[in-house]
Image: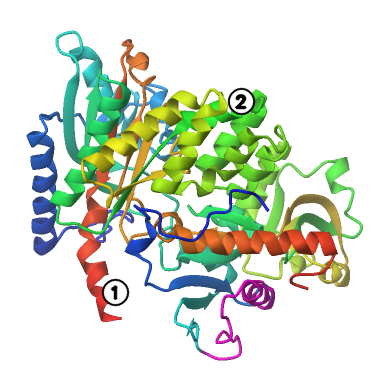
Amino acid sequence: MSRFTVEVHDGGAGVESLAGAEPLTIALPKGRLLPPSVRVLSSVGVDCSSVSESSRKLVFASGDGRTKFVVVRPGDVPTYVEYGAADLGVAGKDVLLEGQRDVCELLDLEFGACRMVLAARKGEERIRINGYPSVVRVATKFPVIAASYFRSEGIHAEIVKVSGAAEIAPAAGLSNVIVDIVATGKTLRENDMVVLDNILTSTARLIANRASFRLKHDRIEALVSGLRESLLNRGETGEGLAR
Amino acid sequence: MMSHPVPGSRYYLPAEAKRKREIESRLTGTFETWGYDEVIPPTLMFAGFSGAAENAGLDEKAYRLVDRQGNLLTLRADLTIPVAHLAASLLDTQSPLRLYYLGNVFRAEEPGTGRQEEFFQAGVELIGAGGVAADLELTVLAVEALKNTGLDSFRVGIGDVSVVEGLLDGAGADPRAKDRARAALSSRNYVEYRQTVQPLSPASPVQELLLGIPSMQGGSEILRRISSAVHLGVEARKPLADLAEVYRALCDHGLEDHVYLDLSIMRGFRYYTGLVLEGYVPGLGHPVVGGGRYDRLLSQFGKDAPAAGFAINVDLLLTVPQRQARAELS
């Protein structure tokens, strides 16, 4: 552990006193990242027992009243955090890069690993080497990331935003290639797609609102230190913190 | 004809307009009590009339239009740069200059972000004065101005961008690593910041300080850490000592409930050169005040003079009572 772990105490002009009694609000992503988020937070003593995805409720309070949770679509987590509707949030790096929200990125939680890839239909895998058509059409849920990737490659691309299932776009004639998230690669294989390039690797991140990071610093810092320590231990023992 | 307001802009209804006027007159009243004189810069500027806007990251957000001669113009995206421009021509007759402004600024945002694109700022510029005394004056004025609007629970954090600069030099960072570290800090990406700093002079006291920058927030305990770091003999010694002196003086002024030390504040690092400040109000997700020292800005207008200032977001202050009322209800 770094010696710079901040001890949780009120040091003279502690900024904590202002918001000390208020609960910490954490925005959690629905779906794939929810169970590991809950496990990781519970492992450092955050009472997440009230959080459940099956219920229709989307706002939960912990039994001890110290924490509140809002469970929202993964892409909305940074939005809740930027506006201070939540103090903290768990969001994939892919979502952060796509959303360009003004938040503090505090910690790599190391779970939810996935790759953002460029993919094409089998039989067209040489499109990148042999040369794209004069305008390559790209179907993606991540237009910001896709546009910046093609800009950096120096390729003129027309980005078509889809809300999901980008892998069917080339077969349907909507696009030449796709930019999409791959966790296991199963979906791509089943749709006869092959990976042409890795754009980035993403993991879940703990993010904070700019003001909360200051006004609720002591609680947030204690949480971050705890999480950092358990991630380190996990690295040393090889045990999964959030398997 | 489009009959709705342009997204990102708004109407102020009578009750809001009245409250806005009240807040503004309290702010400008405070500035005047402190000996600051009002200036009113123009709304339209020639595009690229200084590199300063670009350095502040404001250039890409500027609204652009073309005048009848075909010149590219921008709507002002901030007031510091036009006021600094004006001050450069006044400095020959008077120094230091104490100027304040009140006006709207325009910043283009991506659709759907919900960010206001036209909003009002009230701020001051202290030009031709540097050092601890000027930094102290600026911080005290920021606190007093907020207090006089009727706000009582708020915190103004002070830091210094040259501390990280000096620590990075002390750790032997090459220019690329320095740029990466500073860019990560100012975009508040502390994951990337730590990754950048991790390989620099491992396990040295300087590296420990660098790793600790994002969490160096607080009062007396941070002051103690800063004071002991002063003996490290790195380039950051002077700004750390000055920052500690400003903080102690603020406490002597009885402001310890409203100020704290915060080395994580970076703002736009290319623009700021020394002290930086940001003010936060519980329940508001964005800082209500931001500013600092930009000693290189005047040189863009042919003058070599220290300068510092801050801007208060009037629209954000306008939302305070509603928010607090809602918090009490829930």
Q: In this orientation, which residue lies closer to the viewer: B1 or B32?
A: B32
Chain-order first, disc 2 or disc 1: 2
Dot 2: what SS?
Answer: helix
Q: CA distance from mark 2 to mark 1?
A: 46 Å
Camera sees residue B67: no
Disc 1: which residue: B327
Residue B144 located left or right of residue A193: left
Camera sees residue A7: yes
Q: Chain of mark 1?
A: B
Q: Is residue A54 magenta?
A: yes
Q: In this orientation, which residue lies closer to the viewer: A202 or B110?
A: A202
Residues shaded magenta: A34-56
Q: Amino acid at mark 1?
A: Ala
Residue B155 located left or right of residue A232: left
Q: Amino acid at mark 2?
A: Gly
Identify the mark at residue B170; answer none if there is no mark: 2
Above or below — where is B271 with respect to A4? above
What percent of the width, then of the height, locates residue B20? 14, 54
Please identify the quadrant where the C terminus of chain B is shown: bottom left
